[in-house]
Image (cartoon, grey):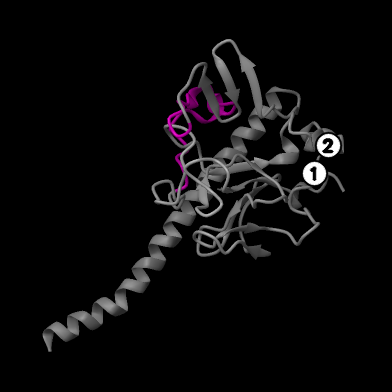
Amino acid sequence: MVVALIGLLIALVLPHLGRGLQAARRTACASNLRQMQTAFTLYLDDHNGRWFPWREMVPEGTLWYWGLEPRGGGSEGLRPLDRSRARLAPYLGVGTVETCPTFPYDAPYFKRKFTSPSYGYGLNGFMIAGLGMAERTGVLRAHQVQNPSQVVTWADSIQINTWQAPASPSRPMYEEWYWLSTSAPPSFHFRHGRLLNAAFADGRVEALPPDRLDPRLDGRSGFLDPPGEDRHLRTSR
């Protein structure tokens, strides 16, 4: 009877512990995104509101907005990344914003790009110079963003890769992704109990549900808006 009672108590308590852990991870992720948004705002204030480029070639190598990949780096999965050179590093400090605790970086279906993760978050593609999205709309500075309370800046992000080893069409794998778009493959990751944390241009963070999900892998990669719409990303209307 004692053993049965203990088993019953465990069965009653474990679901609550799981939900509590999930809520704690979602809160930690939301805190990361608030810091990312604050750092982004400070960067824009110091650069006349101009978006930074997603990539720039510098003498030391390739300066991605999330860090420096030194010249002559390693192969896929072993590429070094200096996060101290990330565009937002002077405003965040290295290590102050950790990778989202629910990001599946150690999952067997995860394909690494670098020797270390960046953040597990993506930036609105309309807010990155050089991708063509901002140039196409003519919105190249923060003050041109219309309805900032409706525009997502940062969000939980991931991409399904089927074309780059060790991934293949028969073996899809997740990898880090760095900008948010409405095109396939999906770049949003609803990792918090089928919800996604998103920071808006007005500074708030919300948990949002998907419009639709991709059934592959953990079934949590998907789209925030219906097909043909990008109401959460468009910086102009």
In the rendering, at what x and y percent does residue 197 appear?
Answer: 58, 54
Q: Assess disc 2: are there few (<14), some (14-19) or many (≥20) residues with their C-alpha within 10 Å of its C-alpha.
A: few
User: Alpha-carbon distance for marks 2 and 1?
Assistant: 8 Å
Element under disc 2: helix
Between residue 75 and residue 40, name the one nearer to us: 75
Location of residue 14 (image quadrant) = bottom left
Q: Identify the residue at horizontal 77%, vertical 53% (top origin).
A: 230
- Marks 2, 1: nearer the viewer: 1
**Per the image, is 91 magenta?**
yes
Between residue 119 and residue 150, name the one nearer to us: 119
Q: Which mark is residue 144?
A: 2
In the rendering, at what x and y percent does residue 226 appear?
Answer: 75, 62
Between residue 182 and residue 23, name the one nearer to us: 182
Q: Which mark is residue 187?
A: none
Element under disc 1: loop
Tag 1: residue type?
A: Thr
First in sequence: mark 2 vs mark 1: 2
Give the farthest residue toward the top: 59
Q: Which mark is residue 235?
A: 1
In which quadrant of the rendered image does the N terminus lie? bottom left
- Could you tell me what secondary structure mostly forms the magenta stretch? loop
In the rendering, at what x and y percent does residue 93 appear?
Answer: 48, 28
Q: Is residue 181 above or below residue 88?
A: below
Q: Is residue 137 above or below residue 85?
A: below
Contact, CB < 8 Å: mark 2 with mark 1? Answer: yes
Give the farthest residue toward the bottom: 1
Q: Assess disc 1: are there few (<14), some (14-19) or many (≥20) residues with their C-alpha within 10 Å of its C-alpha.
A: many
**Per the image, is 36 magenta?**
no
Q: Identify the residue at horizontal 57%, vertical 48% (top origin).
A: 162
Q: Which residues are magenta?
A: 76-100
